[in-house]
Image: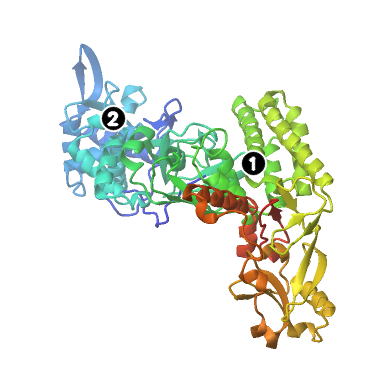
Amino acid sequence: MTCCDKHTEKAFYPSTARMRQPQIPVPEVFQSKGLIDTTKIPSPAMSRMGWALRTLLVSDNTSCLKDRKVGGKFIRKCAPGTELVEWLLNLSPIVHTRTQAAGMWQALLEEGVLCHVAKEQPFKDKCFLYRFKSDEDGTAGSASTSDDVNHANEHIREALPALLHRGPDATLRMILRKPSHERTQEELELVYEELLHIAALSHLSTSIKRELASIIVFEAHAHAGTVLFNQGDEGRSWYILLKGSVDVVIHGKGTVATLKEGDDFGKLALINDAPRAATIVLKENNCLLLRVDKEHFNRILRDVEANTLRLQEHGKDVLILERVAKQRGYSAFKYTVMSGTPQKMLEHLLETRLGGQAGPNDPFLDDFLLTHIVFMPTPLLIDELAANFHADADIDLRQASEEDQEYFLTSKRRVVQFIQRWVLAVRHAVFDDPLAVEFIEELATDVEAEPALQEEASIIHHVLTQLSRYQEDRQMNATQKWKLPPNGQPICLFSGNTHSKTVIRPDDDIIFRVYCADHTYCTLRFPMATTAEVIKACAADKLQIARLPEDLLLVEVKSSGERVVFKDNDVSLPTALSLNGRIFVSPKDHLDALTPLPEQELPTDAPDVDFEALSTKDVAYHMTLFDWDLFWAVHEYELLYHTFGRHHFNKLVVLSTGASFAQDAH
């Protein structure tokens, strides 16, 4: 997983040397540290340059390269940094400043051609002693001949400009290896100038960049295949790739992206305090990176980072997260998902919202569960959950590392927890889907076979118990029949408990009336899923309205006189009526003649209670209960069906209570 800046990458070169020169061959690193020190085997170009400089120094009897006694020990052919700088200034007119000369010597030291006598210092324009590596290990050979000197002079004229341009980079890397407290003000200014040219930091303010200059660290790795961090690891650093490339590897997917110069990664785990979402593997040798550790990231960047994070796979955005204002009682997550591919949103949810990782008020999980049918139909969701649960299907666990085994086990736990939350969020809709039921039953078998998933086995057993009770209840209430009496409230026929909440199903029959303009009516009986077109034709036939179907309308007439025309493909009309509404059939040219029934305008019977005698508290209480019954009678998916159109889902969900309405999304 990667968080990439959208701006164009600029090469990482010091402001004193902006010409695009070939990059320095990166020295081999000490694997224990992962940081560049000096190479054991310098590159041929730098070795040749070191030979030429030493040849000229040795041939000059007045040069600074001399045998010296240091701390009681005799050191051959060494020189202080100040004198080496002065000698290089006098050697060629292209070297103008002491800073340039010191950078050139630092490039040689970094490459392993030059070394500090006491092995303690990078190159400094001070009285620290340095000597060539060939003198230290005794491989310098015999005295130089005149031909050697001529060849050295010729090589210096040709190759010294390249060394000059390598110097600033070497100096910068030397500064970035220093602890923060050792960086001088001049060095901090140099680092700051460099940060201005890094695309991944372009959105940050000047003050933030100046703070980063004191803490950002240079890191280099020599060998392709080196793992920078593993999926599931604790997030400890944010990285910016300066040179080379890395692969982003996710369990079960393999390499999903390749990051190149200018890309940054590792930010999301620091922001959300979540485990690493992917493994980062070096794709090529000699990768250079900048690193900001978590402590400094939290102090400097966490609250000032970009509002939008983009995660990419195969060069395309797969998840976009946006920072949200932290509110009282809100979850610890400061970034919320704004858009993404269904698979990546599910993956992000499983990794960051299950297993106790989310706060109690974090909305993303519930939002996903209640709306996934819009963008991720249940069959696709089940396929992805199965893939996550069986991520180890093609792997020999006996040969897998302990970290991989723990990852696969965690993936299984999260899938089971997702199923539990799914059933809780959408109630019986999961149990109505044969594919979902089959998946849950198969999952239960697999979970029970895993000794390490005892807690999850208990969870899935509870889900199966709920499923069994639901199926028994559905079988008991199969082919229910309903009646819509004059007061407009559906009543379940042949049911002893009129107060229990009962599901109205698409194949349930309902008995209701359809009126015409003269207030005569016919009584019809149809399944809930019957369309308005069928009801209209049948009612017109029974009421002997001699018109073609296309000349007729099916209408709801409200007690206020308002008329609402049903569309031909609307379904579940009896339960879609407003309070005290009635269904009428009418020719189109007689629509204005439709009037409410007398019983709609005034109550036919006096109320049993004196309404004015009730306290406002009692009235509010009963109104709240009634409103809650209405709310409970609406399934979570009905709003989605109504908003996006039932034809997109091919579903009909209607819930009812014994004493209130149930409205279908028509």
> Which element is circle 1 on?
helix
Decide: is 142 above or below 334. above
Residue 363 shows in this picture: yes
> How many residues crowd around disc 1 within 10 Å: few (fewer than 14), some, or many (20 or more)?
some
Q: Which sits in the foreground, 450 or 245?
A: 450
Q: Which sits in the foreground, 195 or 233?
A: 233
Q: Residue 199 appears at what percent x and percent y?
A: 36, 52
Query: Residue drawn 27% across and 32% down?
Result: 180
Please name the amino acid that badge 2 sits on.
Pro
Query: Residue drawn 36% across and 22% down?
Result: 137
Please name the amino acid that badge 1 sits on.
Leu
The residues tagged by marks 2 and 1 sit, at their Cα atoms, a distance apart of 52 Å
Q: Which sits in the foreground, 365 or 482?
A: 482
Please tell me whether mark 2 or mark 1 is closer to you in this view.
1
Decide: is 403 above or below 336. above
Could you tell whether 260 is left or right of 36 in the image? right
> Which element is circle 2 on?
loop
Q: Residue 632 appears at what percent x and percent y?
A: 62, 50
Looking at the rendered image, the quarter that the C terminus falls into is: bottom right
Check residue 424 in the rendering and tell me which mark sits there, or answer none: 1
Q: Residue 29 appears at what percent x and percent y?
A: 42, 31
Query: Residue drawn 66% across and 26% down?
Result: 455
Decide: is 657 above or below 445. below
| Of pointers 2 and 1, the one earlier in the residue sequence | 2
| Farthest-out residue, bottom | 589
Residue 344 shows in this picture: no
Check residue 179 in the rendering and tell me which mark sits there, or answer none: 2
| Farthest-out residue, top | 72
